[in-house]
Amino acid sequence: MTTEQYSHMLEPLDLGFTTLKNRVLMGSMHTGLEDRFWNYGRLSEYFAERARGGVGLIVTGGYSPNRRGWLGPFGGTMNWPTDILNHRRVTKAVHAEGGKICMQILHAGRYGYSPFSISASAIKAPINPFTPKAISSSGVKSQIKHYVRAARLAQRAGYDGVEVMGSEGYFINQFLCKRTNKRTDEWGGGFENRMRLPVEIVKGIRAAVGEDFIIIYRLSMMDLVEDGSTWDEVVQLGTAIEAAGATLINTGIGWHEARIPTIVTSVPPAAFTNVTAKFKQHVSIPVITTNRINTPELAEQVLAEGDADMVSMARPFLADADFINKAIAGKANEINTCIACNQACLDHVFSQKTASCMVNPRACHETELNYEPVSAARDIAVVGSGPAGLATATIAAERGHKVTIYESRAQIGGQFNMAKDIPGKEDFKETLRYYQQMIDKHKVTLKLSTTVTPELVKANGHDEVVIATGVKPRELTLEGIDHPSVLTYPEVLAEKKPVGKKVAIIGAGGIGFDVAEYLLHDNHTLSINDWYDEWGIDPEFEQQGSLVPAQPDPADRDITLMQRKPGTLGKDLGKTSGWVHRLQLKKKNVRLLPAVAYKKIDDQGLHISHGTDDNKVDEVLDVDNVIICAGQVSVNSLYEELQANEPGISVHLIGGAKLAGELDAKRAISQGAKLAARL
Ligand code: NAP
Ligand code: SF4
C-alpha cells in the first residue's frame, strides 16, 4: 500500500476562503453526548481524537435551533448564547489537533418524539406516535430566524461552519414533499413554494455569517418514500441552494420512515454514489457522497471515478479514529473497519444510550477506556480466538504483555467465521483481517489446532489465563433428532453440508434469520442493480421518491422459520436492522411461524402444532431438512477445571463462555477490551 493509491482521497479541497486537508468528511452521527452539558469533556475528546486521526472535516451530531425542533425531550439545542460555552470546548479541542468542524443544525419536525412537535401539515409520521401541529405562516418565518440564530451562535462558538440537515425526512424535507406538505400558503402548493423554506434558511445564514464560513446543505437526493421528490425537483432545489450561498452539498438518502434499507450491512458497498454523480453535473460547488463507504479503497474509487468531490463516512470513524492517518502511512490493513452492524452505534442512540462501536468499544469512551503501556509485562494465555479472545489478546499485547492465543480450530474467528459467509454480512471478514493484522503487529503467539488442558496451562507457566472458549449449539431433546434430515447451523454455515429445497428452521433468533438469508440467496451477493430491483429503487432516480415497483424474485427454496413463543418473529433483532431482516424474508415468502410446539421428526418431515390454545393446529412440514438454530450453551469446562484444581493460576472468564444467553459480539469484544485494559 502506498499513499499514491489514495491520491484522490488525500487531495486537499480548496474552498476559496479555507482549504480542507483531504476529501474525507466525518459525517454527522448522533452520539448521545451532545444532549447533556456534563458530557462535553467526553465529546471534546471524542472529536479531538478523530481530528488527530487526520480527517478533513468533521460534522457534529444534530443540534436543534429551538425546543420545538427537538428530536426527543431535552435534546441538544443551539439557541442561546450560554450554549456557546460548551461548544467552545469542542471547537478548541478539534482546532488544537489541526482539524476543522461544522455544527449540524437539525430540526426534527414531525420526527420529534414530543406532543409539541411541528411540521408543514398535521400529518403523523408512521414511525412516531405524536401528530405534529401545522405551523402558521409567520411561524415558518420564526423557524428560519432560529436556523440563522443557531448558525450565528455556532460561528461565535468557533465552528468552521454549519451543516443544514435537509434530508432523511426531517423538518425541511417535510416542507419539500407533497407527502407531508398540504399547505395552501406561500410555503405549500407548487415546488417553488415548497422549497422556499430551505432556500430562505441558507440565504439567511449566508447573510448572517459572511462569506468565510462553511455552509453544507444535506440534500435528499432520493427520498425512497411515496410522494417524495422527483429528479427535476432535486435538481431545482440543488441549483437554488447553490445560488443561496451554500459552500458544499452533501447527499441524503432515504427518509427514516422509508422501508428500504440505506445503511445496514446488506446494502451493497457505495450503493448510492451514482445518484451523487448524476446530481453533481447540475451544480458547480463541491458535492459530497455518502452511505456504505467504509474503506480507503472504496473512497478512492468513488472519487477517482468522479462520482463526487468528497466522501462522507460517519460510522467508520467510530470504528477507527485513525482511519486517515493509517491510509497516509500506507497501513490501511491496520484500519479497524466498520462492518455496518449498527449494534453499538445507531441501536444505542435509538434506545437513548450513548453510542459506541461494536469493533471499537473505546468510541465515545475515550476518557475512560484507555490502553496504557504496562510497566511490567506478564505472560498471558488467551484460550479461544472468537471476538472476545481476539480483543483481549491484541489489546493486552498492544499494551506490552507477552500473549499467546490457543485455538482448537485451524483458523481464528469463532462464530465470526460463520457470520462472514451470510450474504450481506461479508464485511465481518474485515474484523478478522484487522485482528490478524494486530496479532502480527503486536507479536501475539498464535497456536492454532491446539486443544488446551489444565496440564498445558500449568506446564507453560502463564501468569494469567483468559478463557474465551465461546459457545456450542444447544442440543435438543426431541424424538427423531438423529434423523438424517436434521442439520445444525454450523453444519450448514461452516461445514457447508448440502441443504434441500424444502427447509424447516427451528429457532428464530439472529442465527435462524441468518440461516434463512443464507439459504435464500444461496450465498450469492447481489450486485447494486439487482439489489435496486429487489427493493424497488429506480436506477435512473427519475421517479417520485426514486421508487419503482419491486421486482418479484421468488426464492427457489421453501422455508419455514419457527419459534416457540407467541408474537412477532425477530422482534429482538437490532432496533435499526431487525425490520430489514423481517422484510427481506417476507419478500421471499418465508413462512414465519410463532407459538410452535415441536413434536417429532421422521421420514414424513417435522411434526408440529401451532396457534393459540383455543385454535391449535397440528401440521406435518414435509421438508428435506430441519435445521436447528436453537441458541447456544457456554463452553467453559476448562475454566471450571482450572478453578477447581489450580488455585494458584489467575483465571478470567469472558464472552460466550461466561454467558451464552443473549450472546453477542458487542458484549464479547467490550468485555475483552475492558479486561485487557486492566490486566
Ligand atoms: P438466540 O437469539 O438466543 O435465539 C435462539 C432461538 O432458538 C430463539 O428463537 C428461541 O426461541 C429458540 N430456542 C431456544 N431454546 C430452544 C429450545 N430448547 N428448543 C427450541 N427452540 C429453542 O440465539 P441465536 O439465534 O443463536 O443467536 C445468538 C446471538 O447471536 C444473538 O443473541 C445475537 O446477538 C447474535 N446474532 C445476531 C444477529 C442479528 O442481529 N442479525 C445475527 C446472528 C447472530 P423460542 O424459545 O421462542 O423457541
Ligand atoms: Fe460500524 Fe457496527 Fe461500529 Fe456502528 S457498531 S460503527 S455499524 S462497526
Image: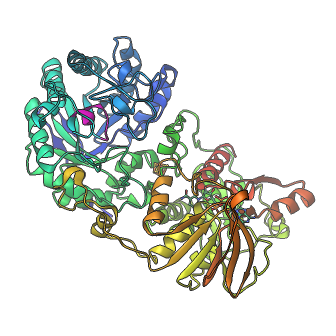
Q: Which residues are magenta?
A: 168-175
Residue 544: horizontal and vertical position, in percent?
20, 51
Name, please, the residue furthest toward the top: 81
Number of marks: 0
Magenta: main secondary structure equals helix
Residue 161: horizontal and vertical position, in percent?
24, 28
| Depth order, front residue of 306/21 | 306
**Is residue 174 part of the magenta span, yes or no?**
yes
* Residue 325 located left or right of residue 23: right
Q: Would residue 4 be seen by someone viewing this image from the given angle?
A: no
Q: Would residue 147 be seen by someone viewing this image from the given angle?
A: yes
Q: Residue at x 11, y 47 (%)?
A: 232
* Residue 355 located left or right of residue 657: left
| Depth order, front residue of 534/404 | 534
Residue 112: horizontal and vertical position, in percent?
40, 29
| Depth order, front residue of 605/499 | 605
Q: Is residue 332 above or below residue 399?
A: below
Q: Residue at x 76, y 83 (%)?
A: 482
Q: Where does the N terminus fall, quadrant-wise?
A: bottom left
Q: Is residue 278 above or below residue 521?
A: above
Q: Quadrant of ligand 1?
A: bottom right
Name, please, the residue furthest toward the right: 645
